Image (tube, rainbow, N blue to C red):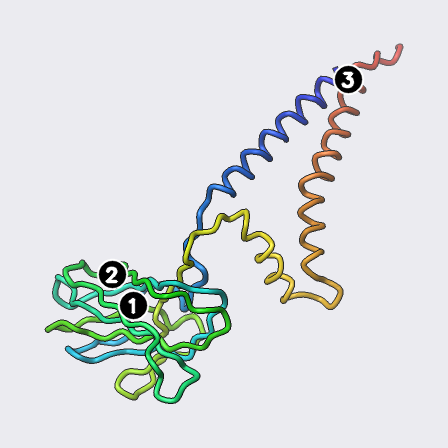
Amino acid sequence: MARRAVLAFALVWAIGLVVVLWRAGADERPVAFSLGGAPVRPVAMLDPGHEVCQAPITLQVDASGVTFFAGAKASPGMPLELTVRDADVAGGRPLATRQTPGGYPDHATRTVRFPTLRAGRAITVCIRNRGGGTAYPYGDDQVPGTGTVVDGRRGPIDITLRFLRQRPRSALSLVPTMFRRASLFRFGFVGAWTFWALAAALALAVPLLCAFALARAAREAEAPGDAS
């Protein structure tokens, strides 16, 4: 009975592990990294032809696009132009300029794609109103950031920007990156290897201890009772 209980536990654990790995491998993540907090309030009211810029932004990983949230005082939303500029060059040499059409509802997601920009590069992202009414991107001032610039005036609210990968990556493939980044906030003796060791302990040591306890409990249940 003890052996059957351990085998049943091992089978359930193995099936659970396979399901977790399968789901993590199938969970595609298009977002490379995010800037700013939740899109909860307008960053700046943009009259026709005006723009708001977020700078400087240092790319944490390669990025091939960006998503932001936009609105308008009167629906439908205004057409917008997003420009990515080189923050390391005086005057901000444009690296990519993309248009997004109008006609969207308030708090709509707008996504543009551009040629891949490499990690470590410093950029400026500007959003210009190309319509005839007032438009605005969304952002949040609760998360400390670089702030924005509107018509030469700096504001405290960061635009919510989600930089996109060229191709989505699975959550499973991102585990080494997660461990490397987690090791930055550590004691001196802790490294990425520590998180691999903890993961191995959770995947192997804990199930083995549970199986041992289960087998011991089953043996004790099979043992004859004490004579009275």
Name the residue located 26 percent from the left edge and 86 percent from the top edge: 151
The picture places residue 15, in percent across and down from the top left corner, at 59, 29
- The part of the image, by quadrant, that contains residue 55 is bottom left
Judge by depth and name the residue closer to the eye, 148 or 86: 86
- Mark 3 burial class by Cα count in 10 Å: few <14, some 14-19, many 20+: few
Residue 197: x, y in percent?
A: 72, 50
Q: Amino acid at mark 3?
A: Ala
* Residue 32, numbered circle: none
Location of residue 198 with respect to 160 vertically, above or below: above
Pick whichever of labels 3 and 1 is earlier in the sequence.
Answer: 1
Q: CA distance from mark 2 to mark 1?
A: 7 Å
Front position in the image: 47 or 66: 66
x and y percentages locating residue 202 in the rendered image: 68, 43
Q: Quadrant of the N terminus?
A: top right
Location of residue 13 (image quadrant): top right
Viewed as shown, does residue 52 lie left or right of 59? left
The residue carrying mark 1 is 138
Q: Check contact, mark 2 vs mark 1: CB within 8 A.
A: yes
Residue drawn 42% across the image and 58% down it: 165
**Label 2 secondary element:** loop
- Say which of marks 3 and 1 sits in front: 1
Image mark count: 3
Which numbered dot is residue 221? 3
